[in-house]
Each structure stands twice: as structure tokens, then as C-alpha cells.
């Protein structure tokens, strides 16, 4: 026992200990242990977190930021590896000769005061150490514990137990500190080439494990199925193995249940009993066997251990189901090494979901570079893969190493559905939009990739609620639908909730749901008069389509009845086929009936409301109503009634006419339009016609035709059209609009008002 261990156990003289960087998960665990032991603990950090506030409630003297005063009077100062030598508190402690310790040295000293169980290995440490601690606790052995993450079943990541003899700790091989421990029992789960930033090669890693084993006073428990672990441990005099067969402890007759795994445990030939493990995956069966073997050696009752493993809920971020509905299961997993990822994908397959979709955030440039091929190989097993930029974890970038490195590797291994989504802040837009009902989405990586999953879970929940309100088939929904797919200008960011109702009732239920929750609602038709900004539309975008909204027929009075989702062109052609004239002007108008009603669309001297007989709409209170033409006010390109109400259907009148007359007017309209208007992607006329001069003529006279920013250009055919030559952004179009308006004002004193509706946000906000 080191002298510090001795001092730590002598509670007649509590130590005054200061922790620099106490908000970090490892350091906060130490603070909890030291406070539990009865020492006087203070801590400082750059930030205040929920955890530091909680610890203050438990007696931590907390200060922020780091100052020299914070360490005054301390017997020992412990610092995290993230603290720089220039840190004010650390420098002051060094100058005044206070005893300094690294985090792992302090943990080793604490562990030495108990019968320590160190859980080590390249993967699975947190899960397994949590299993051991939970099982020992349930078996009544009252262990202390220290694990690397928050484990729901344990309550907190570290706990000091006054009475028990045992202490379970997760040992970290990443920086060589594993060699500091002198436990009573060591567990080696697996040994692989990892942390190649710190180690030369696998042999150097194995040496660190060997040092730990040489300092272990009791059993060395290892996984016989792992080559690395077996090569390090099998010839140890107190080696105890576990695995599928031929080991000291074996798991047999494995049965996959939904989300769990059952198996039978043998010690040698003796059948100990059954286990139903509360988390899925074969790798977790092996982890559970490590826990079973160590608990058995510690004298725990198998029945109690088995029961504990049944209630074990897993570590946060270890195949953690974050959202589950009929449409989607969203799992978050910390896996950041190819072997872990292979195990995670295998577990996912066992759940028999539809597709397995992965959003992977590579962790560290060094690892991405060293293991790119292996990552590519395992990820190619998923059905669809998205890869973000590398999470640096304090590393500097390596030129040429990025998320694309992994994308290329996946392709080399035969993966076809793989895509780079560099920016994590917006990655959920692309991923959420790609999901199909029944998919299993895994956010994967040791950085902050789970944040993308949180956004998807939050929004998917809303869609799920909405679907539950409407009889099956009444709605189609999608997250983050790119509006460039739904506008004739082909620009625009994502719609947070894209909703296609097929019945009036489904439309009404959607607006009511959104109103109750303060979710903004926007209704769009064919998107022919829209300019959606690049940051997309926050809230619900309703696009009436199909079902009642696509009905278009002639009624018993010879009137045209058309749902809001019917294209104007369709109205014109159904009327023509029935020998009803007057609709020819609609032939070349790209919009739908709903949008035409709202905008009182017009061409060739005719406006929509010239022909409306009556309209069915949804009012502000969610009532479906009908109104006659005389009761509706309409103006040039504006129907105020529809600013807050939504058009569902309209009845239009025309006049009986001969087919050849109708055809002649149709041809004339088309000829005129083709002569004067462009066919390239546009949103129709950009500006309303001012009183004195048509906007197109004005823009033409100002000399703007053919000019543009990026791929957006003023049409050569018509000055009031801006066309997208391919790849233009809303920003490009808006910049051009702005230039035109400023010149119209400066040169001609005319205020041009946009005729297209400009909606959405410049920056992403959801
Ligand atoms: N004359 C021409 O050559 C051209 C004419 N146009 C006309 O522009 C209009 C655009 O139609 P479309 O592409 O379908 O519409 P859009 O999808 O472009 O929607 C435009 C706006 O119409 C409103 N809207 C859409 N559907 C409804 C509805 N059911 N009830 C109430 N308001 C609705 C919304 O206004 P809000 O945001 O206020 O809710 C929406 O922002 C049509 O009138 C179209 O004919 C378009 C291009 C060329
Ligand atoms: C395109 C739309 O609607 C169009 C509709 O298709 C057409 C046809 O009826 O009439 C309106 O255009 P407009 O007023 O520009 O009609 P046009 O006949 O093309 O032009 C008006 C006058 O400007 C002149 N003109 C037009 C464009 C140009 O580059 N240069 C020019 O000198 C034309 O020669 C004409 O003397 C609607 N525009 C508005 C803002 O009311 C729309 O709503 O999006």
C-alpha cells in the first residue's frame, strides 16, 4: 500500500484534497469517492455543470475558473490529463510544493485501500465494470465502484461504500496508467491495437497489460475467445478463462430474445444455471461471463448475480435505445473501433429491423488514418452509412484525413449507400430525411454524434403523435424534406416536418395538433411561387396531396370541382375534355389549385377568382367551411381570407364551348407564353407589377437581363424571371433580387415588391 493509500484510510486525519478539472467525468468520480471516504474535497473547473452543482450539494467546495487561491492549504492536488502546465491552480500548487498527482495515480491509491477488481481491455470496459458492480451490489457485497460513464442502473459513475470489501474500477490502457494498479483481481476482456497515438505497436500495449497482471494478487480473468487477451493471460499462474467452450466458465445454449439474450452458464462441467441478460448482443454475453466469473471468485451467489444481469440496463451510449416506435428504432452507441462496430451491427441485425442505417462520427484523426480499411470493411455491412467529420478529441488535424477517408474505404469494400455529411450540426437533416419506416438508426462514435440522434428523436416523436391522430393512410410524413425538391425554382433548405394529408380531416387534425403545441404551420402547393431560404422552414409544412385533394371532376351543374392539390393544368385539360371553355389560361401555370386560390393567380387577362363559384376551406378554429364567391374578397395576387385559412377545394365555372375553340385559345396561350417566358427552372414572376410600368420591362430597361450571382440569372427571355441554371442557392437568388431592387429605387424611384413568397430562415435553427 502506498503512503497516500495509508493516509487515505486514516480517517482520524481527513486530508484536504483539491481536484483541478473536477467537471470531467473521471475527475467527478474521484471527487465522489474522496468525499465518500470522509476527506475534505474542493475542486475547480473552467465550467460549471449540472454535475458540479450536484456535487456541491454533497459537500464539494467548488470554484470556477481555476485560481491560485483554490489550492491554498491543500495536502494533495489531483489534476486531469486535460489540464495544461500553465493552469493557474496547477502552477500555484507546484510552486508551493503541494503534493501533485495525476487522476489515475489517485484512483490507484484509493483502489489499494480495498480489494480491487480492475476491468481492462480495448472494448467493453464500461459495460463490464458496471455489470460487475451491479451484480456484486445485488448479491449483497456492497462494493464501491468507479466506472467511466454514467450508468443508469448504478445511479452515478462512482460510489464509495463504507462497508464492503470490494471496489470495482474501470482501468484505462490508453495512456499506460493501467500499470499503476495493484488489484486483487484483474479482468482482461480483449487486447487489440488501439491508441496508436500513445503506443508503438500491439506488443507495447500487451506489455502494459502484463505489468497489471504481475501486480494482481488474485485471479486473472480473461476472455478465451479473444486472441490478444489469451496471449497475454493464458500462462498466468492464476488465470481463469471464460468463453463458448473449453474455458473455465462457459456460456452455452445461447438463445436470442427480442432485445435480450438467454444462455446457460457452466463452471467446468458443473451447470451453474440460467441467465437472461437484459441487453442484446453476443459480445455482451462474453462481458456478462467476465462478470459472472469475477463475482463467483468474490463469493457472490450465482442466483443473485443472474438476477442482477437480468435487470442490467446497460451503460449510457452502449447500444442504448433512445427512441422506439412503429416506424423507427434509434440506438446510440459509443463504438469507435472496428471490432466494436462489427459487434454493434451484429446486434442490430439480431433485432430484425428493416434496414440498419448508421451515422458514424470517426473519433481521432490518428485512429481514422490507422484503421480506415477496417472501418470501411465493417461499415460496408450496414444498409446505409453516413459519415461526419472526425471528432478530434484534442488532436490536431492530419492533412487528407477526414470523414471522406472512411466513405472512400466503405466504397472500396463494396458499400454503395454511403455518404459524407461533414457538419454534425446539420447531419440529422440528411440522415432523418433518408429514413424509411421500419429502419433501425444507430448513431455511432465516442464524440458527440448522439446530439444528431437527439434531434431526430425529438422530431420523430412529433410525427409519431400526428400519425396516431389520423386513421391509417390519412397522412404521409417525412422529416427534413429538402424544399428544393418541392419548388419549381429548385432551391431551399429542409422543412422540419413535411406532411402530406390525403383527406380534409387529416389536414384539420394536423393543424389542430400543431396549433396546440405552438408548432408553426405553412401550407404549400406546387411551390411555383415560392422562394425558400437555405436554412429551411421551422415547423410543419403541409402539402395537401392525393385522396380528396387530387379529385378533379365536372359536377351535375357543369362546374369544375378541384381539390387544393390538383395542378391548374389538369383543371384546364379536364374542362377541355368535357367541352367547358374558359380555363385555357391555366394551361401554362405551374401551380396547384390551393396556391392559385391563395395568390388569385392569373394570366392572359384572367384571374382565378373570376371563375370561382364557391370554396371549401379550413378556418382558424379548425372547422371545415364553405363560402360562396360573393362572400370572398379578392385582389390582384392576394386573397386575404386565405392568409390564415387554408383552401381545401374549389368549384369553378366555365362556359360550354366547342372543342376546336377551346383548343385554339389553348394554343394561343401556349404560343404567347413560350414566346415571352423562359422554360428554365424559375418561380414565375419575381416582382409584382408596379402601377406605372410592368416589372419585367423595368428590369429589362435597367439592363439586368443575363446578369446574375452564382447560378441564378435574370432570364434573357423575360426581365421579371430569375432562372436557376443549376445549383443556385436561395442566397444567390436573394442577392440578385436585392441588387435589382436597389437599382430600381436609385435609378427610377420605384419600390419593387416581390410577387414570389420568400419564406424560411437563412440559418438552420432546428
Ligand atoms: N402566372 C404565372 O405565370 C405564374 C403563376 N403562379 C401562381 O402562383 C401560385 C402558386 O401556386 P402553388 O405553386 O401551388 O403555390 P405555392 O406552393 O408556391 O404556395 C404559395 C403560397 O400559397 C399559399 N398556399 C398554398 N396552398 C394553399 C392552400 N391550400 N390554402 C391557402 N394558401 C395556400 C401559401 O401562402 P401562405 O404562405 O400565405 O400561407 C404559400 O406560401 C399559383 O397561384 C400559381 O398559379 C406561379 C408561377 C407562374
Ligand atoms: C409570371 C406570372 O404571371 C404573369 C403572367 O404569366 C403574364 C401573362 O399573362 O402576365 C403578367 O406578366 P407581365 O406583366 O410581365 O406580362 P408580359 O406581357 O410578359 O409583360 C408586360 C410588358 O412588359 C414588357 N416586357 C416584359 C419582359 C421584358 O423582359 N421586357 C419587356 O419589355 C412586355 O413586352 C410587355 O409589354 C403576370 N405577371 C405579373 C407579375 O402579374 C406570375 O404570376 O408569376
Image (spheres, rainbow, N blue to C red):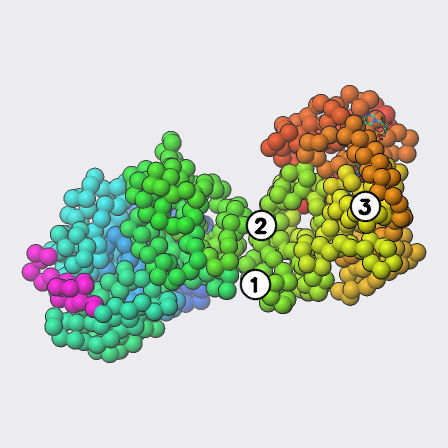
Residue 363 screen position, x and y as percent: 37, 45
Residue at 71% across, 31% down: 679
Instruction: Specify whether residue 35 is in view.
Output: no
Identify the secondary structure beneath mark 1: helix
Q: Is residue 245 magenta?
A: yes
Label ID, residue 162: none
Residue at 71% across, 59% down: 548
First to last magenta residue range: 234-252
Q: Quadrant of the N terminus?
A: bottom left
| Quarter assignment of residue 141 | bottom left
| Label 3 or label 2, whichever comes before in sequence order | 2
Residue at 79% across, 28% down: 676
According to the picture, the residue beneath numbered tag 3 turns out to be: 576
Label ID, residue 480: 2
Tell me, yes or no, whether the two marked residues, 2 and 1, touch with CB atoms within 8 Å: no
Residue 560 screen position, x and y as percent: 82, 53
| Label 3 or label 1, whichever comes before in sequence order | 1
Residue 312 screen position, x and y as percent: 34, 70
Label 2 environment density (alpha carbons within 10 Å; few <14, some 14–19, many ≥20):
many
Residue 98 screen position, x and y as percent: 29, 51
Question: Which residue sits furthest right?
Answer: 630
Instruction: Specify whether residue 452 is in view.
Output: yes
Question: Depth check: 17 or 625 in front?
Answer: 625
Identify the secondary structure beneath mark 3: helix
Residue at 52% across, 46% down: 430
Identify the secondary structure beneath mark 2: strand
According to the picture, the residue beneath numbered tag 1 turns out to be: 464
Question: Depth check: 661 or 22 in front?
Answer: 661
Q: Cα distance, mark 2 to mark 1?
A: 15 Å
Amino acid at each position: 500500500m502506498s503512503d497516500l493509500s495509508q493516509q487515505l484510510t486514516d480517517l482520524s486525519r481527513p486530508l484536504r484534497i483539491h481536484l483541478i478539472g473536477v467537471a470531467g467525468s473521471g475527475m467527478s468520480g474521484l471527487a465522489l469517492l474522496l468525499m465518500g471516504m470522509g476527506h475534505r474535497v474542493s475542486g475547480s473547473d473552467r465550467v460549471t455543470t449540472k454535475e458540479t452543482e450536484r456535487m456541491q450539494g454533497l459537500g464539494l467546495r467548488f470554484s470556477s475558473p481555476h485560481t491560485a487561491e483554490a489550492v491554498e492549504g491543500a495536502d494533495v492536488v489531483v489534476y486531469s490529463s486535460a489540464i495544461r502546465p500553465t493552469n493557474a491552480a496547477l502552477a500555484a500548487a507546484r510552486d508551493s510544493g503541494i503534493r501533485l498527482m495525476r487522476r489515475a495515480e489517485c484512483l490507484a491509491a484509493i483502489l489499494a485501500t480495498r480489494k480491487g477488481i480492475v476491468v481492462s481491455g480495448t472494448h467493453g470496459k464500461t459495460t463490464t465494470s458496471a455489470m460487475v458492480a451491479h451484480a456484486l451490489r445485488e448479491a449483497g457485497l456492497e462494493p464501491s465502484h468507479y466506472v467511466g460513464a454514467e450508468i443508469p442502473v448504478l445511479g452515478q459513475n462512482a460510489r464509495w461504500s463504507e462497508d464492503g470489501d470490494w471496489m470495482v474500477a474501470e482501468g484505462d490502457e490508453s495512456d499506460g496508467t493501467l500499470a499503476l494498479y495493484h488489484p486483487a483481481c484483474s479482468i482482461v476482456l480483449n487486447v487489440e491495437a488501439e491508441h496508436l497515438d500513445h503506443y508503438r505497436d500491439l506488443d507495447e500495449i500487451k506489455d502494459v497489460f502484463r505489468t497489471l497482471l504481475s501486480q494482481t494478487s488474485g485471479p486473472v480473468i480473461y476472455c478465451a475467445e479473444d486472441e490478444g487477451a489469451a496471449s497475454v493471460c493464458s500462462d498466468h499462474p492464476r488465470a481463469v478463462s471464460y468463453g463458448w467452450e473449453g474455458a473455465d466458465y462457459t456460456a452455452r445454449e445461447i438463445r436470442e430474445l427480442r432485445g435480450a439474450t438467454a444462455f446457460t452458464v457452466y463452471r467446468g462441467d458443473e451447470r451453474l444455471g440460467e441467465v437472461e441478460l437484459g441487453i442484446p448482443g453476443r459480445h455482451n454475453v462474453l462481458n456478462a461471463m467476465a462478470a459472472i466469473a469475477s463475482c463467483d471468485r468474490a463469493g457472490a451467489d450465482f442466483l443473485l448475480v443472474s438476477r442482477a444481469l437480468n435487470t442490467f440496463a446497460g451503460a449510457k451510449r452502449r447500444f442504448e435505445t433512445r427512441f422506439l416506435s412503429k416506424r423507427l428504432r434509434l440506438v446510440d452507441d459509443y463504438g469507435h473501433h472496428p471490432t466494436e462496430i462489427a459487434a454493434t451491427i451484429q446486434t442490430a441485425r439480431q433485432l430484425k429491423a428493416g434496414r440498419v442505417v448508421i451515422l458514424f462520427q470517426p473519433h481521432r484523426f490518428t485512429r481514422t488514418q490507422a484503421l480506415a480499411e477496417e472501418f470501411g470493411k465493417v461499415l460496408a455491412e450496414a444498409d446505409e452509412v453516413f459519415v461526419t467529420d472526425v471528432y478530434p478529441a484534442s488532436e490536431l488535424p492530419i492533412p487528407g484525413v477526414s470523414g471522406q477517408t472512411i466513405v472512400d474505404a466503405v466504397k472500396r469494400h463494396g458499400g454503395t449507400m454511403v455518404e459524407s455529411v461533414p457538419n454534425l450540426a446539420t447531419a440529422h437533416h440528411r440522415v432523418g430525411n433518408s429514413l424509411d419506416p421500419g429502419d433501425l438508426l444507430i448513431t455511432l462514435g465516442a464524440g458527440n454524434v448522439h446530439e444528431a440522434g437527439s434531434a431526430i428523436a425529438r422530431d420523430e416523436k412529433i410525427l409519431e403523435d400526428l400519425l396516431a391522430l389520423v386513421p391509417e393512410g390519412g397522412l404521409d410524413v417525412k422529416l427534413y424534406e429538402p424544399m428544393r425538391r418541392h419548388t419549381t425554382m429548385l432551391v431551399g433548405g429542409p422543412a422540419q416536418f413535411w406532411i402530406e394529408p390525403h383527406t380534409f380531416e387529416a389536414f384539420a387534425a394536423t393543424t389542430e395538433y400543431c396549433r396546440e403545441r405552438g408548432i408553426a404551420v405553412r401550407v404549400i402547393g406546387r411551390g411555383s411561387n415560392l422562394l425558400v431560404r437555405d436554412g429551411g422552414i421551422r415547423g410543419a409544412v403541409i402539402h395537401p396531396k392525393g385522396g380528396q385533394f387530387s379529385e378533379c371532376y365536372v359536377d351535375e351543374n357543369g362546374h369544375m370541382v378541384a381539390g387544393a392539390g390538383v395542378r391548374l393544368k389538369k383543371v384546364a385539360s379536364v374542362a377541355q375534355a368535357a367541352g367547358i371553355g374558359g380555363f385555357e389560361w391555366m394551361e401554362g401555370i405551374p401551380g396547384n389549385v390551393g396556391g392559385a386560390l391563395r395568390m388569385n393567380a392569373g394570366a392572359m387577362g384572367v384571374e382565378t377568382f373570376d371563375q370561382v363559384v364557391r370554396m371549401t376551406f379550413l378556418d382558424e378554429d379548425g372547422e371545415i367551411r364553405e363560402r360562396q364567391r360573393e362572400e370572398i374578397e379578392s385582389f390582384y395576387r392576394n386573397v386575404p381570407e386565405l392568409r390564415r385559412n387554408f383552401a381545401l377545394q374549389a368549384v369553378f365555372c366555365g362556359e360550354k364551348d366547342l372543342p376546336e375553340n377551346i383548343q385554339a385559345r389553348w394554343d394561343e396561350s401556349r404560343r404567347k407564353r413560350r414566346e415571352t417566358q423562359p422554360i428554365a427552372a424559375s418561380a414565375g414572376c419575381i416582382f409584382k407589377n408596379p402601377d406605372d410600368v410592368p416589372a419585367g420591362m423595368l428590369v429589362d430597361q435597367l439592363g439586368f437581363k443575363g446578369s446574375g450571382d452564382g447560378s441564378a440569372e435574370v432570364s434573357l427571355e423575360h426581365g421579371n424571371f430569375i432562372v436557376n441554371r443549376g445549383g443556385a442557392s436561395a442566397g444567390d437568388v436573394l442577392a440578385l433580387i436585392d441588387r435589382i431592387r436597389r437599382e430600381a429605387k436609385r435609378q427610377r424611384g420605384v419600390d419593387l415588391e416581390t410577387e414570389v413568397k420568400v419564406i424560411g430562415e437563412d440559418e438552420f435553427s432546428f
